Image (spheres, rainbow, N blue to C red):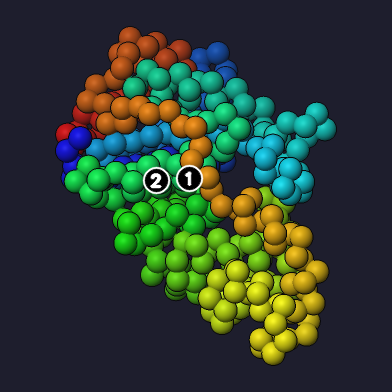
Amino acid sequence: MAPTGGPLLLLDSASLYFRAFFGVPDSLKAPDGTPVNAVRGFLDTIGRLIEDRRPARVVACWDDDWRPAWRVAALPSYKANRLTEDGTEEVAPALTVQVPIIVEALAALGIPRLGAPGFEADDVIGTLVARELARPAGERAGTVEVVTGDRDLFQLVDDAAGVVVLYPMKGIKDLQRVDQAWLRARYGVTSGQGYADMATLRGDPSDGLPGVAGIGEKTAVALLGRYGDLAGVIAAADQVGSGLTPAQRTRLVEARDYLAVAPGVVRVAPDAPVAEVDDAVPATPADPDAVARLAERWNLGSPMAHVVRAMAAAPR
């Protein structure tokens, strides 16, 4: 494959359609009354991204498993706060009915949708990034752009490798380009791995990560700055005279079991069983008739047309 001028665009699909669901008026409905605000917002997001970012390749990355068993086995609290009584993810019914429509729309347009059994979309993205960086230099995308509202994926940021995150600040129109300089300015960490180490120490209640008691973001960053990385911080807890306060040492020692497993839970998988597909931005829809049917049935004429126009203008 010859190199192309446009980036590889990796979409964290659930993150984007959740944002669309909460950001687009729920008055938008299909003729039969089915809500379609998330579908319309998600498709408009794709159209705008292809127009603005001009990618040569694009993948809609998917959660085949939002709470993988292997992460729960390591840390039972992982995303436990999002469980319903029957053990499923708590999602508004008005969004649940729209997800199959999104699946159909992506298939009709010809935009590849990739998941992996037992893995989250984060892991699909991490795997596709790892695959891209393993390509010979002449076959690699100049830039990999990960579009997500999930800060966990900041760990993939790598200036030297050309991996950036585009993070929606206020809706999808205001995308923050997250590179190492931005991580340094915003969080005080110098790399994507530094962000992951900080997040492990700090914890994240939204994901059920308890963190180390008494160590918040500022303290975590200060410790990483002093000891280099998470392994260095953990080693310092076992060394008398390392410079840790007695309280910090005690807290780190008490969190030893958590710190033994949390990095593996926080880290996105680089080797999930993700299929190999043709991810070139389609010049035309895979199934124009299906695009027309979906547009009519679900009141998607404008956003479908937006994506089709954007795809036609993408670099080849």
Q: Nearer the viewer, residue 157 or 254?
A: 254
Residue carrying label 2: 129
Q: Nearer the viewer, residue 36 or 104?
A: 104
Neighbour class for label 2 at 10 Å: few (<14), some, many (≥20)?
A: many
Asked if residue 226 lies left or right of residue 103, the reply is: right
Q: Residue 236 at what x, y percent from top left? A: 66, 79
Q: Position of residue 253 (x, y in %)?
A: 77, 72
Kindly tell me whether residue 252 is visible in this rendering. Answer: yes
Helix, strand or loop at label 1? It is loop
Q: Earlier in the sequence, mark 2 or mark 1?
A: 2
Secondary structure of the residue carrying numbered label 2: helix
Are the two marked residues, 2 and 1, in contact with CB atoms closer than 8 angstroms? yes
- Along the horizontal axis of the image, is 133 left or right of 213? left
Q: Residue 31 or 134: which is nearer the viewer?
A: 134
- Pick the front one: 63 or 23: 63
Q: Amino acid at mark 1?
A: Pro
Residue 163 in the figure: left or right of residue 73: left
The residue positioned 78% from the left and 85% from the top of the image is: 246
As displayed, is residue 31 above or below residue 160?
above
- Among the 4 quarters of the image, the one containing residue 47: top left
Which amino acid, mark 2?
Answer: Val
The residue at the point 75 percent across, 38 percent down is: 83
Residue 300 image point, x, y percent:
41, 22
Give the side of residue 187 with respect to residue 78, left or right: left
Report the disc number at residue 283. Answer: none
- How far across and down, in percent of the image, does residue 79 sit? 71, 45
Residue identifier under label 1: 270
Identity of the residue drawn at 36% across and 54% down: 163
Crowding at mark 1 (Cα within 10 Å: few <14, some 14-19, many 20+): some
